[in-house]
Image: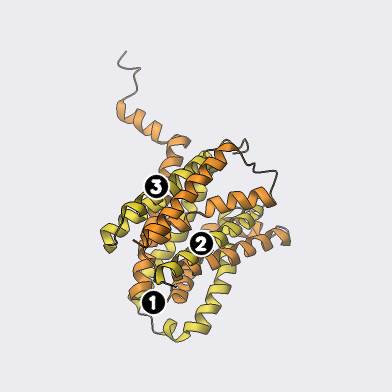
Chain colours: A yellow, B orange
Amino acid sequence: MSDTTIGILLAFLAATEWSVGAIFARLAMQRIASTTTTFLSLVGGLFLVGTVAVIWKGDELLKLSPGILLIFVFLGFIQFMGGRFMNFTSVRLIGVGRATAVIGAAPLFSSILAVVVLGEKLTLALALGTLCVVGGIAVIATENRGNG
Amino acid sequence: MANTATPPTAALMQRLRSPAVLGVLVALGAVVAYGTSQVLQRKLVTSVVSPPVGAALSVFFGMLFLFAASFPRLGKDLRAPKRTLGFALLAGLFSSIGVLATYFAFSYAPVVVVSPITSLNPLFAIFLSMIFLRRLEKITPRVIMGTALVVAGVVLVVVGSRL
């Protein structure tokens, strides 16, 4: 199995696990705030990923430089405070459908950024595929579900 | 007449503050945040840290920021039924597998391949909602059309990554 195939399978695993997580988060947010739900979900998440990191790569954790830690402070901010907080806020302001449709465009932005910053190669098939995924999610997300 | 007319800049500011425009601007902010974090994750796991360490550190610092953001309501929210708190923790367990899998995915494949596939999570969430939260979602021709478009896109990404 090639590295790319493993990467694709892991990406599918990530998408399915996030969607299961989203269902539980939706159930929790019926009674508690989105920020509290996200905080508690990260507490639960840290228990799992922290255990894996300590058992598997504990020595690597001890060798991290302050500079690298600072980069992760920034990453933690944009990934969870920036991404998730703005995601929830946009859902509150314009509803799930429109917010999901706009945020579904994230792969377009990350692909362009990856080509510019990391020098990744974007073939015609990859570009068309990304457009189809983004367009398809927008079509589904803008479906009038009647309950926002 | 001139006194009653709204100055162009004031009218623009008023329009920008409307929930509809503000909501789209905030959603675009989320696009930038998600996109930037994915590129940064790829860079970090291919040259600086291993995927489990990267996932643990980003979740740890994210948790600290969210603690500060949720602090004003935390005491009240923690008095919610245990079942609700359990749902939030379960959301975290599943999402953290997603975070871990993403970091590993970025260590094997480029952003242009991983990103479109991880973005499928709203689609899976809709289908899971249809199965488990039947009162919320219905399969309509529009959903089928959108799904067909997404599946075609994924096939193109998978095939395109091998060219």
Q: Which residue carries the number 3 mark?
A: A131
Q: Chain of mark 1?
A: B
Residue kind at label 2, given as amino acid type: Phe
* Quadrant (top left, top right, bottom left, bottom right) of the N terminus of chain B: top left
- Co-location on one chain, circles 3 and 2: yes
Residue at image point 57% right, 56% down: A19
Q: Quadrant of the C terminus of chain B?
A: bottom left
Residue A38 location (% of width, % of height): 56, 59
Q: Which residue was labeled with disc 2?
A: A12
Residue at the image point whose x is 63% and y is 38% from the top: A147
Q: Residue at x 45, y 54 (%)?
A: B155
Q: Residues within 10 Å of mark 1 (few under 14, many from 20)?
A: some
Residue B162 in percent (x, y) is at 37, 63
Q: In the current view of this chain or complex, which residue is farthest to the bottom?
A: A59
Residue wearing tag 1: B49
Residue A115: percent from left, percent from top: 28, 58
- Can see residue B131? yes
| Cα–Cα gap, marks 1 and 2 | 22 Å
Mark 3 vs mark 1: give the one in front.
3
Q: Estimate the spatial distance between the alpha carbons at disc 3 and disc 2, rounded to whole Å.
A: 18 Å
- Discs 3 and 1 share one subunit: no
Residue flagged by tag 3: what amino acid is it?
Answer: Leu
- Front position in the image: B132 or A62: B132
Are tags 1 and 2 found on a single chain?
no
Q: Secondary structure at mark 2?
A: helix
Which residue in the rendered view is the most extreme toward the top? B1
Left or right: A120 in relation to B64: left
Residue B110 vertical placement versus B124 (above, below) = below
